[in-house]
Structure formats: C-alpha cells, structure tokens
Amino acid sequence: MLTAFSQVEQAFRDMLLTKADGDHFTNLSKLYGLAQPTDYPLRSWRLALKACALGPRGSLGCTHDVLEGAFDHNHERFMVTLDATNPRRVTFASHLTPADGSPPLGGFLCRHVERLVRIRFISKLDLPSADLTLLDYYPEDLSWTDKIFWTAGPGFNGYTEDPPGTPIDWDHGAEAAWLELAPMDTGYFTGAHWNYGDLEVDPAFPTAHMTILAFRYKEPSPGPIFDSDGNVIGTYPGDNCEFQLEADAAALYGPGTYLMDPAGVDRLTLGAFPPPPGGHIMDEFNLDGLVPAPPAEGDILGAGPMPTYLDSSDGGELTELMSLFDPLLAAGVKLTMIQKLFCEPPP
C-alpha cells in the first residue's frame, strides 16, 4: 500500500508528542509519566502531555496548562467583542456549536459566572499603525494576545449593574448579553482593562475569542478574615498543602448529551431546547410500575434511547484523573478533585 511517509519518517513521527497516535502515543504518554486514560480524547491528552513534558512540573503555570489541555474537549467557546468604553466587559457575539450537538446559546448563562476564561484578542499596540485594511484580510498575520481572566458578573445574585438592579432570572435559563470581568491582577488571572496599557483594544478590531474553561482551582490556605474596617474577625480554615480542583460534573459522568431517569420521560417537556436523544438508564423490570414503562432495551442502531452503563468503580474517571494529576504538583501537596455543578439551581 502506498503511504505518504517512508518507514524512517514514520518511525521519527512515532517518537514525537505532536505527531504520534495509537499505541505509539500511549507508550509515549507512559514514558513521560502521564499515561493516557482509556478512551480519552487524543487531542486533549496530547495538549496535556505537551504541557507536562515541556513545562516545569510543580509550578502553577505547568499545572494549569496540563489541566487546560486535558479538559479541552469540555471547554465552551464563544466569539465576543471588547470595548474600551466598558473596560471590564465582554459582549456576546456568538456561541460556537458544542461538540455534543446541543443547540448554540443566544447569550451567557449563570454557569458562566465565577469562571476562569481564556480570551484571545489583538491589542491596540499590535495593530498596524497606518494600513488598517490588513485587518479585513489577514488577521492571522497579526500578533494575538491571550490571557486568563475571571468572570465576576453580571451580579453575584443575578442583578446587573446597568441599569442598576435589573434582575436576570438565572434560575429559569435567562441569558445575559455580556459578562463582567474581575479588574484586579492575581496569581491566577489577569485583571481586565480594555482602555489602557497592553490590554487596550482599538475600535478597528474589537473581535475576540473566549474559552470558558471546564474547571477552576484554589489553594484553601488558612488565613485571617477581615471586616470592612480591616479588623481581624476570624480565620479561614484550610490546609497549607492542598490544591483543590473543581471540574464540571457533567463532563466527568454520563454521556455527552444528558442522563435521564426515568428513561421514559418526554424530552419535549424539558423546555424550549430539549436535549437530543442520548444515554438513558434502562429499567429492565419496571419495578416502580411506571405507565408507560421505561424502555428495557436500548435501540442502539436507531434514534435512541441508547443504554448507559455507569462505571462500577468508585469515582470512575474522576478517580483515574486524580491519580494521574497528583504527581504534577510539588512534593507534599495534596490534590483534591471535586465534581462541581456550576450554577446549580436552588431546590
């Protein structure tokens, strides 16, 4: 059979993290100390392994890059616009179609607040000074900047800042046209200010790419609690050597679409945008006597429902990822992974 590469070239590619696939990539990942989990998306683990192999293990930057790569298939991606007149704001432009086939959103939801986001944009300093027509044809030739930010609003309690006090009904799926970013720099993210410095944007090119990361993390170290006057009123509980990782529970368990119980529920009753046919928990004996009875067998060759068999091991993918990520941290640091439902509606 004709191939595009000689045997020497193929052997060389099988030794490269960026080119190897199949068993060759699996063996490489083991050699670098970050073995690929069973049936894990190749692109995501390749990004994680690249960050692990080339980065300084034990540092926050390397740990973040590994996590961002490993959860790449679970991130949400948007096109947004930036405006120097609203220096902390990102305005919704479009939602890139999710990989699981669910319909794109028309705005931001409450699950997008208090999240780490990566924004890729062109700053005013990197724009051509004379011929702005270049932006219409060759934006890929310009220097793009990307940094990590933190979404702080609109409204920690579902209220916007302009007009003041305007409610957003997060609990019933309301969508917001913009997100507010934290303005201060920290060790975890950059403060947003589109109106000055190296983050200043030009009205000639306000478009940006925003990725909402499928995880967030913290180091719950003990420390003082201050009141509004600066007086110590208590102490935060915590562990000096703990790294807490919060990952989207929906990304770790069940199918990529949804998990329904009972399986006989009518999808069309779940709102304006019902989920597509996906995995169901089968009820072979209908012990609850439901009418109509839930499906006992999955129509795996048809339009569904498709059976879902849960992992019998404790924690499933969460436990496996914990064991793999733990060696990335500095010696003596304990890793705790928490499955998190971001913006879980109240009971």
Image (spheres, rainbow, N blue to C red):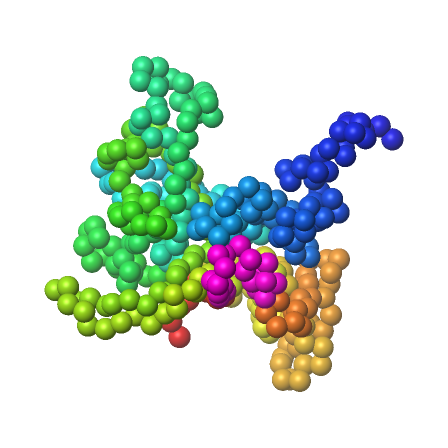
Q: Is residue 50 visible?
A: yes
Q: For residue 43, what is the image quadrant?
A: top right
Q: Residue 64: x percent and y percent? A: 47, 50
Q: Quadrant of the C terminus?
A: bottom left
Residue at the (63%, 52%) spot, across then down: 33
User: In terms of depth relative to the viewer, which is nearer, 21 or 29?
Assistant: 29
Residue 40 placement, left or right of 201: right
Check if residue 190 falls in the magenta segment: no
Outermost residue to the right: 1
Q: Residue 303: x percent and y percent? A: 68, 58
Outermost residue to the top: 130
User: In terms of depth relative to the viewer, which is nearer, 89 or 340?
Assistant: 340
Q: For residue 226, what is the image quadrant?
A: bottom left
Q: Quadrant of the N terminus?
A: top right
Residue at the (48%, 52%) spot, across then down: 58
Residue at the (19%, 72%) spot, across then down: 233
Q: Residue 269: x percent and y percent? A: 51, 66
User: In terms of depth relative to the viewer, which is nearer, 1 or 275?
Assistant: 1
Residue range (magenta): 317-337
Q: Is residue 173 visible?
A: no
